[in-house]
Image (cartoon, helix red, strand yellow):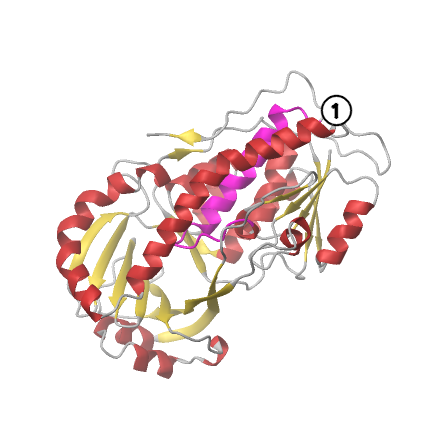
Amino acid sequence: MRAVVVGGGVAGAAGAIALRRIGAEVTVHEAYGEPAGPVGSFVSLAANGLRALAVLGCLPQVRAAGFALPWQRMWSSAGRSLGEVARGRARGDEMVSVTLMRADLVAALRAEAVRLGARIVTGSRFDAARVRACLDGDGVDLIVGADGMWSGVREVLDPEAPRPVYGGMYSVSGISHVDGLGVDVGTFNMIFARRGAFLYLGAPDGSVWWSAQVSGPCPVDVHAVGIDDLIDIYRTEERAVEILRATRRIHGATLHHVLARVPRHHGDRLVLIGDAAHPVGAGQGASMALEDAIALAQHLHAEGVVASPVVASPVERALDGYERQRRARVDKMVREATRNRDVKTAGPIARRMRNVIMPVVFPRVYEGATSWLHGYDPGSLPAWTPGSLPARPPGSPPARTSSSSPAPTLGTPRA
């Protein structure tokens, strides 16, 4: 099977790994000159995302590039504790949440994809017209749309699909060095501020990574938002102001967009993964993209379409199975993300109610309420050894996988 992956970010690089693991020939097209690049801020991977990385063979590399965050603390605007829980996991789960720069996550995934024989072409933009031309050409069996929220592949798949709209928030992230404030290493902190939320965490090198998530009814030029502007926005949150004043650099300014439910995630030779299909937010975008990549490869492998991609019905069955498996889970995650966003943008009455109820309820219900998310087991992919997946020369017949290849295990909830 010849697969073209459009987009070389988290979803695209993970998709390339998973497809190579089942024997597909994979070319990734990335619009930017450097797939990792200085794009985005830091990302956190909860237990479900880490288990997906283990399946893809990248967990040690990602852990080495980031640092562990075992705990999460929530704070009111006035600095009152609203509760502490295990971060992104059940309390006894060994998969302790990891935070790292998005570029480092992409770099680790890309390196593994290349090691497995995937080809990554940078500076290669795939707009809707190029997707159509690729479909009309000869030799491509599958196009994987991993090109994010503004996906050109989604436009080709369904011209009537919803378009992203501003979601009422924007974020600016940065790194500070704050002495004497007692910012614990290994703890993720979230302040429910009067205008959105302020996230901060202590890194092992003594720096403080932060992200200001500001609620606002209208889009702004995020690149024009400076430290003085943020200090004024968070003037009632003392800890946020102290961290902002110690900022050494700003990065990752972005508007938050939302996307209505995408009706179709696949066609006969087109399939969407990651934010192209479901930009979930709530810190789960990367993890959901990793899960998608594994599930897609599992269904293609189970139907045998890597060996015989010219047979249409198994491809359609594989893509149908992929969408059925993922749809309910990502729809539930999108609903959770909406509630998460609503909590951050709550009005004064809702904030007061939250500050009273949360210290009592949050520590008691968090683990049980999120077990469906963090306890997910992504299953397995066939093992890979050097030389087991030879790339075929251009124009040669489709490569056939060995019938002795171990069958993958499809993802299921662990709990």
Q: Residue 318 at what x, y percent from top left?
A: 62, 30
Q: Nearer the viewer, residue 109 or 193?
A: 193
Q: Which residue is mark 1?
A: 400
Up/down of 221 relative to 89, above or below = below
Q: Residue 413 at what x, y percent from top left?
A: 39, 31
409 horizontally vs 376: left or right: right
Q: Main secondary structure of the magenta part?
A: helix
Question: For the magenta stretch, what is the residue range?
Answer: 277-306
Mark 1: which amino acid? Arg
Q: Residue 252 at what x, y percent from top left?
A: 47, 67
245 horizontally vs 299: left or right: left
| Quadrant in the picture for residue 179 | bottom left
Q: Is residue 105 magenta?
A: no
Q: Residue 173 at what x, y percent from top left?
A: 41, 68
Q: Secondary structure at mark 1?
A: loop
Up/down of 259 relative to 272, above or below = below
107 horizontally vs 168: left or right: right
Crowdedness of circle 1 by 10 Å Cα count: few (<14), some, many (20+)?
Answer: some
Whether residue 203 appears in this view of the structure is no
- Residue lying at the far front in this picture: please name it: 160
Question: What residue is drawn where x is 27% and y is 59%?
Answer: 189
Up/down of 369 relative to 177, above or below = above
Q: Nearer the viewer, residue 385 or 283?
A: 283
